[in-house]
Amino acid sequence: MTEREFLIPVGPQHPALKEPENFLFKVEGEYVVDVEPRLGYNHRGIEKAMESRTYIQNLYLIERICGICSNAHQTCYTLNVEEVLGMEIPERAKYIRVFMAELERIHSHLLWLGVAAHEIGFDTLFFYIWRDREVVMDLLEMVSGNRVNYAMPTIGGVRRDIPSDKIPQYKKMLKILEERTKYYKEVAAKEQTILNRTVGVGVLKKADAVRLSATGPNLRSCGVAKDARVDTPYLVYDQIPFNVITYDGGDQLAQILVRVDEVLESVKICEYCLDHLPDGPIREKFSPLGRVPEGEAVNFVEAQRGEDIHYLQSRGGDKPYRYKIRAPTLANIPSLIERLKGGYIADIPIVLAGIDPCFSCTDRMTFIDIEKEKTWEMTGDQLRRYGIEWYNR
Amino acid sequence: MLSLIDEHSRLLDGLSIHLGTENVLDKKIPRERRIFVTVKKEKLKEAMRYLKEKENFIHISTITALDGGEYLEVIYHLTKKDLNLNLKVRTPHDDPTVPSISDIFNGAILYEREIHDLLGIKPEGHPNLKRLELPEDWPEDVHPLLKRWDLESIRKKINGGGE
């Protein structure tokens, strides 16, 4: 380490991350030279806990891995259990699951867009987007009864039906979302405040993204069309027409544009589901004491942050022998580091937020000057303001 | 045109011929877009290189490790368009090592640290095997996903036998 280099630990509590994570930044002046991640502050031992719970108990435990992708994890879990059971679920249930998954994607992407606007100091846009996000939150509540942790998929189907007399109202709400998102797309592509802070910031090269097995919008913003909904189709995604959105450039603007366009695609998928909802039952029977035969299964779900993969091994009985979960954020950490290297300290908040890790607002970080053995601390909000003021100079 | 299943068997045959059939211990195609194949541990890197170079697998989704009773099992989940291949190797409890594949698939670097942390399986040749998920002061020999550790015994170990 040269005399001009400093180490800055950021986290475990950080403004851009809901799961507490620690990043040790090596900086020289205003530039980030290297980053070392330290994970695990939120390791709750869910995989171990699942081995001592029944399949139905696990259904509700797995939903609580993450408040934003709860439906994605639960869908993936039910797909695994149903595959080992050899159970075919009703068509109507598949459509309702897809409908829920896409609503969740809309709410998550809008939330992220608001957060991204906040990170660059554009709080007006943040409030506008979050106001409009309430439309999809209301819609989720009308369909499932909950704003988060919807508990819709269950082993064998879904828990609640979509009443046909509500469909016109749902469609009206989707229309509002579509119109507003189109407006934000225009804002993102033209507004100088956004362009100044995102063009050429936190760039990830296509080759690095592929080499480091990145996933989700993080990968698609580098021009790679990889999407689990198309590559290994599940539920009824192979029957629904939609586009996989990619943008070239790999910077933060490309990440914004990918997500805005994905919201528009999701609205289309939701409308398609409502139009083509087949009649019939919504679930097969699975007893709360149900046993699952020996077997194993791997399933992929395209969660809003990327590919979510679960592995189930059953050795008979009412509890899984081994259940493995890999949520998309872990896959995106190596490429996130690539994005941070060579950038400015002032860009850390937007680049960290860029891969859409979970978000937390109560945070502190310590800056350590190792040469003078001096320590000073900054709250996350101060770092965000530091970034905004740095750009105002 | 070949169906997907035929295409999968062709891939598996190619892999068997390349590694030698005696080195492929088990293979199955449970449904379209899924392959499970078990190879000998010594042939892991060769298999990975073959799959990357000849079959164009570029994405590693994750690595699962599990305590299978008499053995430890490590499963490498590779994906490409229309196919997910799960390559398994086994290793005994008294020699918990596998060759590191993070030089072939760079994306595996954190997943290998994870299996080292949680099951004590050492990927040989990995550049940095620091703790990833467990705290720094966690006891060295406690790997919580092994079946012999349960909540009680871990608690006892951490508290030094007392309450």
Image (spheres, grey):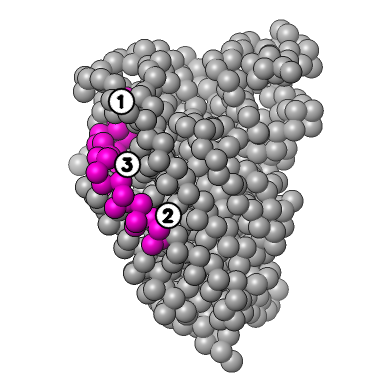
- The front one of A40 and A156 is A156
* Chain bearing mark 3: A
Q: Are marks 2 and 3 in contact (CB under 8 Å)?
A: no
- Residue corresponding to mark 1: A280
Image x and y of residue B65, in percent: 50, 29
Residue A5: image quadrant is: bottom right
Quarter of the image for the C terminus of chain A: give it. Answer: bottom right
Query: Marks 1 and 2, Cα distance to the nearest angstrom?
Result: 27 Å
Q: What residue lies at 70% left-to-right and 73% top-to-bottom?
A: A2
**Taking A92 as reference, is B126 left or right?**
right
Who's the residue at 47% across and 45% down the image? A269
Q: Is residue A185 left or right of residue A290?
A: right
Q: Give, as a three-letter code, the residue at label 1.
A: Gly
Reading the image, the residue beneath label 2 is A106
Label 2 and label 3: CA atoms lie apart by: 18 Å
Q: Give the image location of residue B27, x and y in percent.
A: 61, 12
Q: Which residue does the numbered mark 3 point to in the structure image?
A: A63
User: Which sits earlier in the primary sequence, circle 1 or circle 2?
Assistant: 2
Up-down relation of residue B67 to residue A352 (above or below)? above
Q: Is A234 one of the magenta-colored residues?
A: no
Determine if residue A284 is in view.
Answer: yes
Check disc 3 and report its element: helix, strand or loop: helix
**Magenta segment boundaries in residue numbering:** A148-177
